[in-house]
Image (cartoon, rainbow, N blue to C red):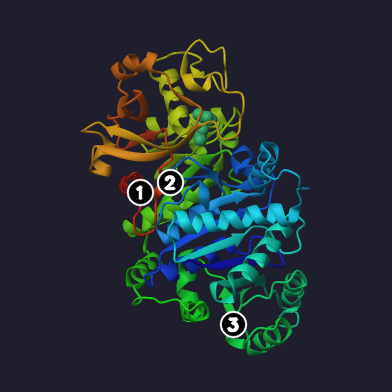
């Protein structure tokens, strides 16, 4: 029988509710509990896959091919578990399944309403996750901020959930902000009081309040929150800003949050096992050496757009005992003078993306990395651009392109997947999720992975055009990885280069702090040598 923790957020967004939820997951897991996580997103999109990265940040892809919220990335990295489409549910999904049921006649005779039908469907999804993941504890994060119109049905649903399942099986945690006002040298609790007030208006009394602060929580602030928000003093938890997000679980542990939750939910746990994590965190905080890596992207002003890449580079740095110093370049800006922008870098990474904008800049950056022998990692669109660059500048196929950017190119070295030709609906129809990839024995990739068959996550519509394979081979490009069943090119490499690897999949989604991704690890290792 699972127990449930609901995490809500107040005052404003971007307080780190995802990291806080993931940290609680990691802590409970360290006590031997089986954890699962669920993120509710109150927007009407069925999934974030159709949103611009500027709107949403990264779209995290699960093993089973769901396009999900980037918080699922935090969850996977913190609880070290593969999640699935069950673990992210949007308002769009809830409404469309209720409407489908209505059309099928499942509610014949009834008026379909937010309460009880929408709220009922939300509760079903919570139970489904618990059952599917056979969890002892499910941590349910409710997206948005208390007070948003969109979040209301979700909050109402979890209020009912507690009523049905009982207090001993449910716990409400509310994350708020305590702004520091330098003028009066004070931490302000009023916004927290107001947001808890909003929660209580709709019938939810938080059991624990996590207070995001810049400076340590004072006794005075703690007392005030306790009194006005109706929680015990020990249930007001400091969530102080940290530079390294992986430290958050440690900080919470110091605040005795884990024991507090265990006691409140009456969980039976085994001995604490957090040493390895702790060691990793200490290691990640004491990196002496530095390596300069450039990321040439299309959405670099929105750092969240490359969340998992950011993390994967950090993880790879830690195992190489090196701090990865990142330099972000907007691809369009380096079209003119790649040399000037990139000359001080030790490694260059070109990540995924969609659409024509910035492509020429990416191609210039790749040309620079190839010619100047700078270690290079291309991911998805980055791999497609590397293919185009090689076709144009090494094979001399003038105007070679992807049909995504130039449908009538004379050399479509990247072309649409056959099964994508007749796809009209944009949502959830790319080549998504995990596929096997067989590696060539002597390749950089094989050396990194140390095994022949690997599984990686995908999210794309276009691919390497096999008609050009032979000429690429002849001119010195190595096809280093293949999806055997369909003979699709998954990895290209340039053997006559210190380290040039470009992959059609997204390795970043599988990197975890203690289990960094082998391609990132070797990319950093080679970059350090530069
Ligand atoms: N736009 C390219 C495609 O659809 C690459 C996608 C990506 O980088 N995720 O194939």
Is residue 380 positioned above or below 397 on the image? below
Distance CA(mark 2)–CA(mark 3): 36 Å
Choose between 290 and 42: the one closer to the eye: 42
Q: Position of residue 94 (x, y in %)?
A: 65, 48
Mark 2 is surrounded, within 10 Å at the Cα level, by few (under 14), some (14 to 19) or many (20 or more) other residues, namely: many
Residue 435 in the image, given as x and y percentages of width and height: 38, 35
**Mark identifier at residue 517:** 1
**Sequence-wise, which precedes: disc 1 or disc 2?**
2
Query: Mark 2 or 3, which is nearer the eye?
Result: 3
Report x, y in % for residue 104: 66, 37
Calculate the distance from the C-alpha at mark 1 to the C-alpha at mark 3: 38 Å
Left or right: residue 159 versus residue 436 is right
Task: Establish if 468 lies above or below 115.
Answer: above
Q: Residue at x 39, y 45 (%)?
A: 346
- Marks 2 and 1: in contact by CB < 8 Å? yes
Instruction: Please indicate whether residue 94 sits to the left or right of residue 61 in the image.
Output: right
Label number found at residue 508:
2
* As drawn, 415 above or below 95: above
Residue labelled 3 has its Cβ within 8 Å of some atom of ligand 1: no
Label at residue 235? 3
Find residue 202 and report its image quarter.
Answer: bottom right
Labels 2 and 3: the sequence-earlier one: 3
Q: Which residue: 43% across, 28% down?
A: 386
Q: What secondary structure is marked by label 3?
A: helix
Q: Residue at x 35, y 49 (%)?
A: 517
């Amino acid at each position: 029988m699972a127990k449930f923790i609901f995490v809500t957020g107040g005052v404003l967004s971007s307080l780190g509710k995802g990291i806080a939820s993931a940290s609680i997951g990691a802590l409970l897991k360290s006590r031997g509990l089986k954890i699962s996580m669920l993120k509710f997103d109150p927007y009407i999109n069925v999934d974030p896959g159709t949103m611009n990265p500027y709107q949403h940040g990264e779209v995290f892809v699960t093993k089973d091919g769901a396009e999900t919220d980037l918080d699922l990335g935090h969850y996977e990295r913190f609880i070290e578990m593969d999640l699935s489409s069950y673990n992210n549910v949007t308002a769009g999904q809830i409404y469309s399944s209720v409407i489908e049921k209505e059309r099928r006649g499942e509610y014949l005779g009834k008026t379909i309403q937010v309460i009880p039908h929408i709220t009922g469907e939300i509760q079903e999804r919570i139970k489904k996750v618990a059952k599917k993941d056979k969890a002892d504890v499910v941590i349910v994060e409710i997206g948005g901020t208390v007070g948003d119109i969109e979040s209301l049905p979700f909050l109402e649903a979890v209020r009912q959930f507690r009523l049905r399942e009982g207090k001993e099986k449910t716990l409400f945690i509310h994350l708020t902000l305590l702004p520091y006002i330098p003028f009066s040298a004070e931490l302000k609790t009023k916004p927290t009081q107001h947001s808890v007030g909003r929660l209580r208006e709709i019938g939810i009394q938080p059991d624990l309040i996590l207070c995001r602060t810049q400076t340590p929580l004072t006794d005075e602030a703690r007392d005030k929150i306790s009194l006005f928000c109706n929680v015990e003093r020990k249930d007001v938890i400091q969530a102080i800003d940290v530079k390294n997000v992986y430290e958050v679980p440690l900080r919470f542990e110091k605040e005795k949050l884990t024991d507090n939750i265990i006691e409140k939910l009456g969980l039976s746990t085994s001995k604490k096992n957090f040493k390895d994590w702790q060691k990793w965190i200490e290691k990640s905080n004491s990196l002496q050496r530095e390596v300069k890596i450039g990321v040439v992207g299309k959405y670099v002003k929105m750092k969240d757009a490359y969340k998992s890449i950011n993390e994967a580079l950090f993880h790879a740095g830690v195992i190489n005992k090196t701090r990865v110093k990142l330099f972000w370049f907007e691809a369009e800006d380096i079209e003119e003078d790649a040399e000037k922008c990139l000359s001080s870098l030790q490694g260059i990474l070109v990540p995924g993306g969609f659409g024509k904008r910035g492509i020429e800049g990416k191609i210039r950056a790749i040309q620079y990395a190839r010619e100047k022998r700078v270690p290079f990692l291309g991911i998805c669109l980055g791999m497609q651009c590397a293919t185009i660059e090689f076709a144009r500048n090494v094979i001399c196929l003038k105007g070679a392109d992807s049909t995504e950017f130039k449908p009538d190119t004379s050399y479509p070295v990247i072309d649409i997947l056959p099964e994508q030709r007749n796809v009209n609906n944009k949502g959830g129809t790319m080549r998504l999720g995990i596929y096997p990839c067989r590696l060539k024995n002597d390749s950089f990739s094989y050396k990194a992975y140390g095994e022949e068959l690997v599984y990686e996550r995908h999210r794309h519509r276009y691919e390497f055009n096999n008609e050009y394979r032979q000429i690429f081979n002849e001119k010195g490009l190595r096809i280093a990885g293949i999806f055997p069943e369909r003979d699709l090119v998954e990895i290209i490499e340039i053997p006559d280069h210190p380290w040039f690897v470009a992959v059609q999949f997204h390795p970043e989604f599988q990197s975890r702090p203690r289990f960094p991704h082998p391609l990132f690890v070797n990319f950093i290792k080679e970059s350090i040598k530069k």
